[in-house]
Image: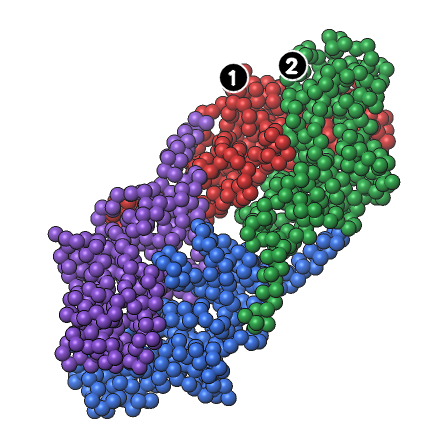
Chain colours: A purple, B blue, C green, D red
Amino acid sequence: MPRLAYLGPEGTFTEEALRLLDPNAERLPRATVSAALTAARTGDADGAVVPLENSIEGAITTTLDEFAWGEPLLITAELLLPVQFSLLARPGTEIPHIKRVYTHPAAITQCRAFISRELPDAVVVSAPSTAAAAQEVSLPGSPYDAAIAARIAGEHYGLVELAGGIGDRSDTVTRFVKVSRPGPLPAPTGSDRTTLVVFLTDDHPGALLEMLTEFSVRGVNLTRIESRPTGDGIGRYFFHFDFEGHVADARVGEALAGLHRICGEVRFMGSYPRADGVAPQIKRGTADAEFAEAGDWLDRIRTGHV
Amino acid sequence: MPRLAYLGPEGTFTEEALRLLDPNAERLPRATVSAALTAARTGDADGAVVPLENSIEGAITTTLDEFAWGEPLLITAELLLPVQFSLLARPGTEIPHIKRVYTHPAAITQCRAFISRELPDAVVVSAPSTAAAAQEVSLPGSPYDAAIAARIAGEHYGLVELAGGIGDRSDTVTRFVKVSRPGPLPAPTGSDRTTLVVFLTDDHPGALLEMLTEFSVRGVNLTRIESRPTGDGIGRYFFHFDFEGHVADARVGEALAGLHRICGEVRFMGSYPRADGVAPQIKRGTADAEFAEAGDWLDRIRTGHV
Amino acid sequence: MPRLAYLGPEGTFTEEALRLLDPNAERLPRATVSAALTAARTGDADGAVVPLENSIEGAITTTLDEFAWGEPLLITAELLLPVQFSLLARPGTEIPHIKRVYTHPAAITQCRAFISRELPDAVVVSAPSTAAAAQEVSLPGSPYDAAIAARIAGEHYGLVELAGGIGDRSDTVTRFVKVSRPGPLPAPTGSDRTTLVVFLTDDHPGALLEMLTEFSVRGVNLTRIESRPTGDGIGRYFFHFDFEGHVADARVGEALAGLHRICGEVRFMGSYPRADGVAPQIKRGTADAEFAEAGDWLDRIRTGHV
Amino acid sequence: MPRLAYLGPEGTFTEEALRLLDPNAERLPRATVSAALTAARTGDADGAVVPLENSIEGAITTTLDEFAWGEPLLITAELLLPVQFSLLARPGTEIPHIKRVYTHPAAITQCRAFISRELPDAVVVSAPSTAAAAQEVSLPGSPYDAAIAARIAGEHYGLVELAGGIGDRSDTVTRFVKVSRPGPLPAPTGSDRTTLVVFLTDDHPGALLEMLTEFSVRGVNLTRIESRPTGDGIGRYFFHFDFEGHVADARVGEALAGLHRICGEVRFMGSYPRADGVAPQIKRGTADAEFAEAGDWLDRIRTGHV
């Protein structure tokens, strides 16, 4: 039974993701993304589950930065989790009584319409996570009357759901990934994704175009690009890339080797099955069989067998 | 005397930036970036000053998203502000007494070494802004013993600086921008930057490469790219671009028109002097005079005067 | 009635092309392509008709080089002429009698199968043109027994057609162009072609790729590229380009101006209706209306009307 | 002692090239480039020497087409031969006596100034080769008074050199290549050239740009591109490419395999030492050691050793 750290406390969306990714795992809540990943890195856990991006909030920058620095980790699975917010309170509380609401800033953003309409006079205070907000509200003597969090958090902390599905959009999704220390990769499935972190040696004009050309010339389609500061001043960035395919695919392997040759550092973050099951578009001339045939041809002409 | 909204309360780094950008402005603190920009949009203020990115934390995503949606605004100036953190407390407090520290999460990240070394046993709690933390600490009966914030916040709220320059890095910088409702652009200075928000009509493979090619073929160098979710599900993004030059420059104008032709929506966010005074590298064939000469030549050949 | 020089003597395929291009023209035969173009340049003729390329032989390099150097000329029309070869002889000659055949080297190449099969023992001698061969054969006392030439040449010079359609391929085509001194261009028809000659300032690696990118980024499709030596040593070339569209088209105009900016010299050789009537594929974002709309948008944002 | 066919008769510039390329070879003159290459293909000769391009005349299209069709051949060496024309006549002839000159059309073009100045009234007639012209002039009873050809041709055919170095330019050069049936390639020397013939599967817009990108992304610099008609109508071409480097070089091999994957047919024509001894510019990230290192890295990450 694997032991997996996650962004806790109990009741977070991340816990929900972990349960779906690995129902049998022992769950080790940690206070922060960094702490969860540290547990995976040090061996306190066999791996970790953390959020990577949200369809409203965008990238979870702590996760991006943790992946880029420190000991390497590999993504072995991803999950797309619909995010549904609930208004949670101690038993006996009713909506008109609510004067102070506690929740994560992302939830404030995503439940703006509900808050304006149903809680126009309430003060809304930022919490470190939605589950932490629920935990705080569950304490007797809490200064807060309600939390906005996942329903699962209410169950954990003994809160009542006063309203469910209160997000402005019903289709909000968070993408979670499971990581572990380096080891054998998940086998290719035909619907895979690969994640990289790339640092530039020198930040010359056109460097990004050169990187994208390494992908496009081998028919590898990007699905996400994020820039993050290196810390060395405004204007210096490194990049996260997600793209279609598995490093075992010939076209992906050659593109990665090409990036490795022209960039300062390429950190491979894993190849793993896509949660959405979408198969890649294989451009003419970039299938594995075509790479193999071209390799055979090259071997022949190098020995003069034209 | 212009009236400028900013991310308050008094004592934020944003206030410091505003004072440097426009010493004579009347300053209107607002609780959030959104509120400051709303003030500028509605006419409650003549403009606003907000943070755009930090050399450690990266983009201020609220600012990016506020720029992309809602009524258009134009950036008219930028400022690079070195960020120095101070440990601030009520008079009489000494470091050994500090059990609970209140500050913004970015400051926690950036002062990690100082906290570990000097405050190993303190609990550090997240605040909505560093100035809000200082304000809270200044209240009699606050549960917090100290705040980490800008020195200016201590002055505002009557706190004592127990330690200064406590960030892990001494070279952290935040980039602020001044925005106003659409109107005449700042004149070109020879060292300008232009900011765009770009939405794709359809998110086909290679769309990003096509956009970058519109810039590179006219010799326009990118200085920043950020992707942000459109809200329509994981995998759907829009882009922020910063690049060298002024929209009045021929090469920049043609590149923008090119993007406008191939993209769903291009929102022009302004051309304004660069805070670092760096002049662009003008690639051969892309100077204004060369565009003008080529235009004359084209007029001639179109009338058969070859 | 225009006076048009052409590659003579009477009876050449070029004369046939001229008759089709301009039935009412006065025809001025000249001994060489150079002489025909010189007549057009000096005003001895109002224009000239010359071959540009053949579907078997390729480019007529004399034409390419004449276009590139000397006084400018403009192509105003093109014609695709199926090329049918005939075996022509003085009245009374029969195939078994033929010992010596006279014709242009291109005809030797293109009638190889007929010659091997029907004239296995004949000596085949190179002539400056197929019509010159017919003219020579028509002379009493000619050392040659037969010519391979256009049927029209036989009619001119009183020869009998012993065999017709003797080319190895029945679909051989020669492309002819009509040129004149610079003047108003033919109006766009929706199915046009434009021809350029381009010289590089410096022959750096990637120069050709840069030129092609100027076309592709504006959605302009090449239909022909030829390299020709500049005369300054092996490895120094200039280029001929044919591409879809008319210089009056916005996308074509901008591409030409782009080439003009980055190349040493761009010689515009004309925009004229395509002989095959094929309409261009207009890539999204490159139609005239889209250029106009983008230009209006650019004007607005340059004055701050975003 | 190898037996090499060449474009004869004796006295051609090609014979001179053959003597320099392989002084000990037995020389087998053939009447045409095609015949010389046929001798190499059938085994009548061990190889052949033929002209490929001239710095004034451009490509020798017969050679290009012969390379593209029929049994494969490999280029194993190249030579750059300065071309010096002489005016040659039978002993006793003087310049004022010359009424009829016989020579190859290329020589007419290249000696235009001399002919205008020294032989203003002479008729100049086209010959199949300069050596054939000298041979003809050497015959008693020839209708021609002089030939323009290589000095070596005069020596062969017993002609006197009336004037030497009569070309308009003193720096004209012809590039010759030695070919043989497929077999082991010349070893890399650090200054090599590779030649390809490439046919497209479908002639879609952008196909040429895609081909050039396969080269540029691996830092392989083109030195020559020629388009030739496939024979299937105007607008259908195949391509000859020369570029820096040896197929044994990693960057060249990968570029060739890339072309092979996306193109209909790639015919490898050999890798051989450059006659000019110029070493390639190796772009960062494209040296053999960098390819090897990237390949090792790829092997590691594919097994999860990140």
Instruction: Please provide percent x and percent y for residue D287.
Output: 41, 45
* Residue occupying the point 31% across, 75% down: A118
Q: Are marks 2 and 1 on the same chain?
A: no
Q: Residue B144 vs residue C192: left or right?
A: left
> Numbered disc 1: what chain?
D
Query: Image check: C59 left or right of A275?
Result: right
Q: Which mark is residue C146?
A: none
Chain of the residue that carries numbered disc 2 in the rendered image: C
Q: Amino acid at mark 1?
A: Gly
Q: Is residue D17 visible?
A: no
Residue type beneath disc 2:
Ser
Residue found at x 45% / y 75%? B177
In this rendering, would A133 be left or right of A232? left
Mark 2 residue element: helix
Name the residue beneath numbered marker 1.
D43
**Badge nearest the viewer, 2 or 1:** 2
D252 vs B14, nearest the viewer: B14
Callout 1 secondary element:
loop
Residue D292 horizontal/vertical position (percent): 35, 43
- Residue D73 placement (x, y as % from top left): 51, 25
Q: Which residue is mark 2?
A: C116
Cα distance between the residues tagged 2 and 1 = 22 Å
Q: Quadrant of the N terminus of chain C?
A: top right
Quarter occupied by the C terminus of chain C: bottom right
Viewer-proximal residue among A30 and B282: A30
Residue density around tag 2, few if under 14, some if 14–19, many if 20 or more, within 10 Å? few
Please tell me whether residue B21 is drawn above or below residue D258 in the rendered image: below
- Please state if D208 lies on the left or on the right of A118 as rendered: right
Of C166 and B234, nearer the camera is B234
Q: Relative to residue A194, is residue B70 depicted above or below?
A: below
